[in-house]
Image (spheres, rainbow, N blue to C red):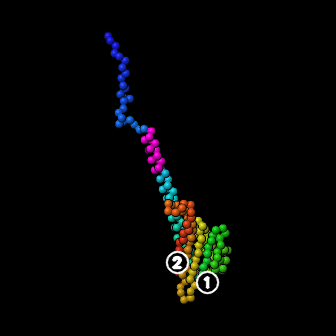
Amino acid sequence: MSQAPNVRRKDPSRCRSKGNAGFTLLEVLIALVLITVGLLGIVGIDGVSLSNTSSARARGMAAMMAASMSNAMMANEAYWAAGLFTAPGVINVNPTGTGTFTGDAALAAAATTPADCVGSACSPLQMAGYDLSNWATMVGQLPNGQGQIVCTTLVGQSIACTITVSWSENVQGSKQIAGTQNTYNYQTVVQP
């Protein structure tokens, strides 16, 4: 018998056609880069979303604060509608630190050391000072929060007061330089 020459047969499991060669390292790296870019985009959107949520929260709080002071002014007509404040009828609230009130001296004094109007009866001035002090505490919850009330004092005209709540927000966006702060105002007008 004759012996066949030593020929190795190819293992069919090792044979691959060029079209079915699997993933190359380059393809895997490209896929990882694309996934990374996508994840970074999602993180960026999440950051902007949180910023917008914070901004909406501050705007909503400012609206509620202005409405709260408006309601307190309408409830205390004996002070606000009677025009007992000193002309020109401006009171500024800067609640940072201990809180300062400027403008009408009597109202500022009543707000700086407010009477306890919950447990006892108060005069209209004491009640206005109590309301203003509570409002200053609320305004102080906003970043760099400040408030102002400006009332008309023209004889023969009904009294109208403009309530302004101001605060600052960090800028998040591509149109402005990130990290800077913008100041926003919310105003409402009330006739007590």
**Quarter placement of the N terminus:** top left
Q: Is residue 187 magenta?
A: no
Which residue sits furthest top? 1
Part of the protein shown in magenta = 25-39
> Which of the numbered marks, if any, corresponds to residue 189?
2
> Image point 54% across, 81% down: which residue?
160
Q: Decide: is 4 above or below 28.
A: above
> Image point 52% across, 67% down: which residue?
59
Which mark sits nearer the N-terminus, 1 or 2? Answer: 1
Neighbourhood count class around disc 1 (C-alpha, 10 Å): few under 14, some 14–19, many 20 upward = some
Q: Could you tell me if residue 98 is visible in this image?
A: yes
Image coordinates of residue 96 in percent, x first then y, are: 64, 68
Neighbourhood count class around disc 2 (C-alpha, 10 Å): few under 14, some 14–19, many 20 upward = some
- Dot 2 lies on which element? strand
**Quarter placement of the C terminus:** bottom right
Type of amino acid at the residue the image marks with label 2? Val
Query: In this figure, which residue is indicated by the disc labeled 1?
Result: 87
> Image point 59% across, 75% down: which residue?
148
Type of amino acid at the residue the image marks with label 1? Ala
Q: In this orientation, which residue lies closer to the viewer: 20 or 156?
A: 20
Which residue sits furthest left? 1
Which residue sits furthest bottom? 156
